[in-house]
Amino acid sequence: MNVLNLVTTPRPFFEDQVRILERKGVTTTTLTVPGRGSTQDSRSFIDYVKFYQPTIRHSVRDYDIIHANYGLTGPFALAQPRRPVVLTLWGSDLAGKYSRISRICARLSDETIVMSEEMRSDLRVAAHVIPHGVDMEKFQPIDQSSAIDMVGWNPDSRHVLFPYDPSRPVKNFPLAKRVVGQVREEVNVPVELSPIYDVPHEDIPNYMNAADALLLTSQREGFPNSVKEAMACNLPIVSTDVGGLRNRLSDVSNSYVATTEQELIELLSSVIISGQRSDGRNHVTDLGLDQMAENILSVYRRALS
């Protein structure tokens, strides 16, 4: 099977997707929207206009499927009339300012993939729930003291990991700062809030094993990859009620979903005081890369039929 991938920003989870599908015999070519920057918003309208020509030029070649990854690539995949289109929505493309484009493209695509049941329900279009997979070999528990040494953190503090760029409004870093500030007053140990971003993805497991908790304060999510990776490392999670995490974390020890700021403070305090890890890895085995690839291949076959 020969697949043409369209993507705005080829993030690590997308690169894992391509790699595992190629391992299973899929031949892939990836076209990336031109322009500088690491986010969808960093591209200009002209950048997207420039993306049209190479997409059409490639689509006449011997591809079986056009796979649009992220809603903004959907119009370009659908602009060509020759190949079946599979659209994958990542989360922010469905709930954010690009929602209308994503919803229209989902109705017009041959098959649509979303990250969670909540996204499928919100979309109101037939869709397959296939979250991005986790590399279970890369993300696994290691000794916390060793991880702290590797990342250079203070071993006498408790560390709360914030896995996003604080400048992204949807991630709500000001809320995370307020929560951790209150937690410091509740517990009898130093607590540091550590935003981790723009570091090599291969280093992220070290930070997750060094941290005492992951704090997610997002206003909206699909099914955040940082949570899946934290679960694979048995890192406790305290999160706002987004992305279907209430169901996913309901049976995970020492991990919680909160609906108010005060709940976030209380739950994060309890995690810090406990000093315990979670059993998240036992609850994320269905999200391995191999299973994700098999599910995507099944969608490709449906599109071809």
Image (cartoon, rainbow, N blue to C red):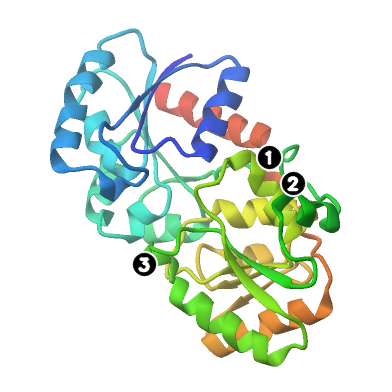
Q: Which amino acid does label 1 sit on?
A: Gly
Marks 2/1 in contact by CB < 8 Å: the verdict is: yes
Q: Farthest top residue?
A: 62
Measure the C-alpha gap from mark 1 to mark 3: 30 Å
In front: 265, or 178?
178
Residue count near mark 3 (Cα–Cα under 10 Å), binned few <14, some 14–19, many ≥20: few
Residue 224's spot in the image, x, y percent? Answer: 53, 55
Q: Mark 1 points at which residue?
A: 288
Q: How many labels does the image show?
A: 3
Q: What residue type is labelled 3?
A: Pro
The picture places residue 158, in percent across and down from the top left corner, at: 73, 72
* Residue sitting nearer the eye, 153 or 134: 153
Residue 170 occupies which quadrant of the picture?
bottom left
> Is residue 156 placed above or below 27 in the rendered structure?
below
Mark carried by residue 285: 2
SS under mark 2: helix
In this view of the protein, can residue 124 be seen by the observer?
no
Residues at discs 3 and 2 in contact (Cβ within 8 Å): no
Q: Taking 152 as reference, is 95 left or right?
A: left
Q: Where is residue 128 in the image (x, y as percent from the top left)?
A: 48, 44
Q: Name the residue under label 3.
A: 169
Q: Is mark 3 on a helix, strand or loop?
A: helix
